[in-house]
Every structure is written in C-alpha cells, then in structure tokens.
Image (tube, rainbow, N blue to C red):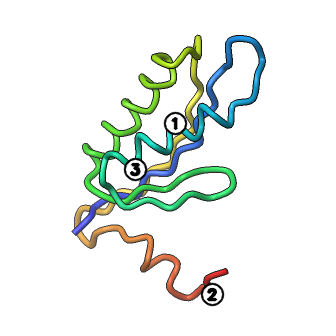
Amino acid sequence: MANALVSIQILPKTPNGESVIPYVDRAIEVIAASGVPYLVGPLETTMEGELAELLDVVKRMNEEMIAIGAPSVLSQVKISYNPTNGASMDRLLAKYPRA
C-alpha cells in the first residue's frame, strides 16, 4: 500500500527564455520511467507510492532538467504522507466524475 502522494510543479529556467514545455515533458518522462502511478494535471503532476521513492523521483527530475540544459530549476512540491492508513489518488478522487 502506498503511503504518500507527492505533487510537483517543476519550473526550469530555460537558457534563452524559450518555452518550458519540452522540459516539463521530459520531467514527466522521468516520472513515467520510474514506474510509479501518476496523474498529470494542468498545473502539477501527482505521484503515488512510498515517500522515499517519490522524493527520489523528484530529485531525478531536477537533475534531468540541469542535464538537458536548464541552468536552474524551481520545484514546488506538496506531500501527503499517511504511513498508517496509506495514500491513494483513487480514494481521494472517487466522489468526483471523470472528465
């Protein structure tokens, strides 16, 4: 059972002021490659899993932004941690209709 939800909005500074979209796409690829369940939203992406693993994914995302040319990165992170009862995107979203 997952014990955490981590939402991240990653905002890389681009070298010449170009669009951040290709960078954000690459950050989401890092999440996808990790194998953790995730949900992309319009302003942030939420991951579900073990807290330590999710924080490692956040670290890898930031490192990848630098590796592909961003001189710096700002990441806004939200964490819901519940080691007793677990954390679930499905449970939190169950009462809302899917678009």
Local SS, label 1: helix
The answer to whether the residue labelled 1 contacts the one labelled 3, judged by CB atoms less than 8 Å apart, is no
Question: In this picture, is 65 found above or below 28?
Answer: above
Q: Which numbered marker is on residue 26?
A: 1
Q: For the residue marked with disc 1, what is the amino acid?
A: Arg
Which residue in the structure is indicated by mark 3? 32
Q: Nearer the viewer, mark 1 or mark 2?
A: 1
Q: Which amino acid, mark 2?
A: Pro
Q: Residue at x 51, y 42 (%)?
A: 77
* 2 or 3: tag closer to the N-terminus: 3
Residue 88 position within the rendered picture, expressed as x and y whole percent measured from the top left: 38, 71
Report the Cα–Cα distance between label 2 and label 3: 24 Å
Question: In the figure, residue 5 lies in which quadrant?
Answer: bottom left
Q: Is residue 86 left or right of residue 45?
A: left
> Which residue is disc 2 drawn over?
97
What is the secondary structure assignment of the residue under circle 3?
A: helix
Figure disc tally: 3
